[in-house]
Image (cartoon, helix red, strand yellow):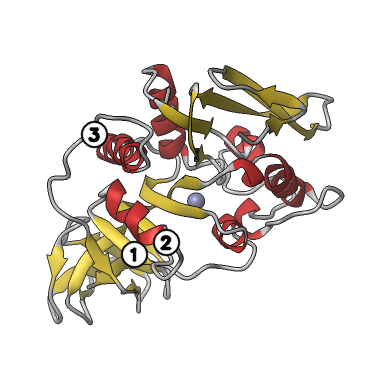
Amino acid sequence: MAEMIINNIEIRPGDDLLIRLNISRLPSGTQIDIPIHVFRSEEPGPVLLLMAGMHGDEVNGIETIRRMIRRRMLQPLRGTILAIPILNIYGFLNFSREVPDGKDVNRSFPGSATGSLASRVAARFTREVLPLVDYGIDFHTGGASRSNFPQIRCELEGEGNEPLAQAFGAPFILDSKLRPGSLRKEASKLGKSIIVYESGESLRLDETSINTGIEGTIRVMHHLGMTDTSVPVSHPPVVCKKTTWIRARRAGLFRSFVKNGQAISRGQQVGTVADPYGYASHPITSPVNGYVIGLNHMPVVNQGDAILHIGVE
Ligand SMILES: [Zn+2]
């Protein structure tokens, strides 16, 4: 069996460890570490990464992983689980997506040990954690007051991605291209399959999203042979090969007439944007048949703001 070492700490079969991956110091001198829970079975098997908080304000995923750790659900029968509730500690402290250098960790892979903070976080992760991983689930939420309906995003062509996405069993699977500098792209270069679970919105907890995330993780563990028990899927996922955003053509007060997750048809009125003074109200209609997979919860919109994300089968 290959040696597993993180931050100079060796992980042996049967280990249950909390490793603190040191990153940097704050201007105050406080040391910033990323806590990584490691649960390694005596039995060999795959290494599954569960990670949240790459965007520090996306607390829903953080709570999802915290709950699974707390309920001791992550001790595999076979293989190893690496659970990282918060990758971006800085953003978590600042209620922010980014790190203090203003950059997005998920556009900074593979990173550099001598770069700015986002790049350093990415580099530490790429060097210490990623080489050990076979599969991964990266937990995210919508940003900027936009709420995502539970969905898995991955490149369906990528090897091993679709079976993992199907196993997770979220209501929607989106075929999503690899973006430069993203963790998914870096992982795919190394032949590792990391899928993204998107659900809920930043700085809010959402029980449906959390429960769907927990059940999906159990199903992925079962699919990988890491546990013998599973949770049945109520409906097979709807696979969306395309997605499109409706943007506000006018500025004003936005109201939605649809719910996240629901099917909509072309020409259907999905909401309205009104001026705040009571003069006029303008309908918003869907350009396609599809499903609402993301919805803006911020009523005040500017021209061009993304207000509704539609998945097309
Ligand atoms: Zn995110």
Q: Residue furthest right?
A: 114
Q: Nearer the viewer, residue 240 or 53?
A: 240
Q: Is residue 181 above or below residue 12?
A: below
Give the mark nearer the N terminus: 3 vs 2.
Answer: 2
Q: Residue at x 17, y 55 (%)?
A: 236
Q: At label 2, which amino acid type do we have?
A: Cys
- Disc 3 secondary structure class: loop
Q: Position of residue 312 (x, y in %)?
A: 25, 74
Label drawn at residue 162: none
Q: Which mark is residue 154?
A: 2
Residue 143 seen in the figure: no
Which of the two marks, 3 or 1, is nearer to us in this view? 3
Label 1 residue SS: strand
52 vs 76, left or right, is right
Q: Position of residue 167 (x, y in %)?
A: 29, 49
**How far apart are the two marked residues, 3 and 2, measured between alpha carbons?**
22 Å
Q: Residue at x 17, y 44 (%)?
A: 233
Front-lying residue, 196 or 222: 222
Q: Which residue is mark 3?
A: 230
Q: Is residue 224 above or below residue 246?
A: above
Q: Quadrant of the N terminus?
A: top right
Q: Secondary structure at mark 2?
A: strand
Relative image position of residue 168 (x, y in whole percent): 30, 47
Marks 1 and 2, how far apart in space? Answer: 7 Å
Left or right of residue 104: residue 73? left
Q: Is residue 146 visible?
A: yes
Left or right of 27 on screen, residue 271:
left
Q: Is residue 213 above or below residue 264?
A: above
In front of the other: 73 or 270:
73
Q: Which residue is mark 1?
A: 174
